[in-house]
Amino acid sequence: MPDSIAIKFVNQSSSGFDSLDIEKGSALVDKLDATNSPILFGCRTGICGTCAIRVHNPENCRPQTQVERDFFESVGLEQETDLRLSCQLSAEHDLSVEKVRV
Ligand code: FES
């Protein structure tokens, strides 16, 4: 796949989902939902936290947006700067992600 990004799922081996190649620049919410990945989605607007992930290589990911900072602060996780809401992310660089419950 030209200009593809690898999304590696950490600690998800029981789901049978190790990694996924998606087109660079695409919205994670569209690609992960369509492929039945272990990352689930609810509101898709940054409110519910269903899609929360820990990025194991945060240097490959943009900083938290204000929406993400507001959400993680609301659940007492404002210190966890490697958390993101996958519904707010697009695929710009290879990522290693882990589903987290908040
Ligand atoms: S799906 Fe609700 S915060 Fe991402």
Image (tube, rainbow, N blue to C red):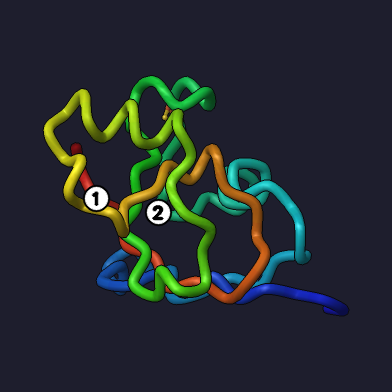
Identify residue for label 1: 100
Report how far apart the C-alphas of labels 2 and 1 lie in the structure: 11 Å
Specify the label residue 33 is tagged with. Answer: none
- Residue that appears at 45% across and 27% down: 46
Q: Tell which tag, 2 or 1, sits nearer the viewer.
A: 1
Q: Is residue 2 left or right of residue 60?
A: right
Residue 23 locus on image (x, y percent): 77, 65
Is 85 drawn above or below residue 28 in the view shown? above
- Dividing the image into 4 quarters, which one contains the C terminus? top left
Identified by mark 1, the residue type is: Val
Residue 43 locus on image (x, y percent): 47, 20
In the picture as drawn, the residue positioned furthest to the left comes out as 76
**Kind of element beneath mark 1:** loop
Foreground residue, 1 or 63?
Answer: 63
Q: Is residue 79 left or right of residue 60?
A: left
Residue 90 locus on image (x, y percent): 65, 52
Identify residue for label 2: 38
Q: Is residue 31 left or right of residue 2?
A: left
Foreground residue, 35 or 77?
Answer: 77
Q: Quadrant of ligand 1?
A: top left
Q: Residues within 10 Å of mark 2 (few under 14, many from 20)?
A: some
Is 62 drawn above or below residue 85 in the view shown? below
Q: Residues within 10 Å of mark 1 (few under 14, many from 20)?
A: some
Identified by mark 2, the residue type is: Pro
